[in-house]
Amino acid sequence: MARAVAGPEIERLVQLLARVPGLGPRSARRAALQLIKKRESLMAPLAGAMEEVLGKIGTCPVCGNLDVRSPCLVCSDPTRDPTLIIVVADVSDLWALERSGAMNARYHVLGGTLSPLDGIGPDDLNIASLIGRVRDGGVAEVLLALPATVDGQTTAHFVTELLRETGVKVTRLAHGVPVGGELDYLDEGTLAAAIRARTTL
Ligand code: ZN
């Protein structure tokens, strides 16, 4: 076993960094070393930025996005089309769709997908608040941008049935989104094409 080259404080920094998605133990060690070398220009601002976000971050009461303001930046943007709500499973999907730049809409984050095997039912997701938003009026279309997994499609079907009585137009992403694919991993062009070619349910 290799002997430690630095004290437990630095080891702890490395171990925490290694938990960041995309970083493994080796990259975490490199990142830690860079942070330490650039402690004035990088580590201090990073620590400050993290502390600032940590103190203010919360879930938007309207759409479920994560932001330091409430309602979130997306919900409080008057230039967005209020008649279109894009429904996503996770905040990462919202961010991915925004990167595609294809739509100028509002969102609704369900916080997951229905999964009977994992005991995740309708009450565990932000479904009731979505129906409430549509019932409040002013929404012409709900675009279901849910994963092409069994659970994602079960969720899409369930939400579609609930929305039927409201008379709102319900659409979903066009195929081209790979089966089992997570939106976060799609490139912007594929996402934009799937949105443009969306189909009515
Ligand atoms: Zn919001």
Image: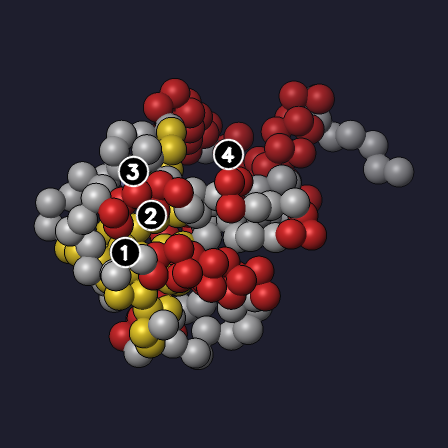
Disc with the residue nearer the chain's start (2 vs 1): 2
What residue is disc 1 on? 166
197 and 48: which is toward the camera: 197
Between discs 4 and 1, the one toward the N terminus = 4
Q: Spot the residue most to the right.
A: 1
Q: CA distance from mark 4 to mark 1?
A: 53 Å
Q: From the viewer's perspective, is the residue at label 1 or at label 3 nearer?
A: 1
Of residues 191 and 7, the one drawn nearer to the viewer in this rendering = 191
From the top left corner, tell me how far across and down residue 145 is, in percent. Answer: 39, 62
Q: Nearer the viewer, residue 121 or 16?
A: 121
**Residue at 44%, 79% in the rendered image:** 176
Secondary structure at badge 3 equals loop
Please tell me which residue is depicted at 40% across the width and 61% down the height of the picture: 160
Q: State whether label 4 is within 8 Å of ligand 1.
A: no
Residue 62: image tag: 3
Relative to 139, is 58 above or below? above
Could you say where residue 70 lies in the image, as x and y percent from the top left? 27, 30
Between marks 2 and 3, how big is the CA–CA gap? 12 Å
3D distance between C-alphas at marks 2 and 1: 8 Å
Dot 4 lies on which element? Answer: helix
Q: Which residue is mark 4?
A: 35
The amino acid on which the numbered mark 2 sits, given as a three-letter code, is Ile
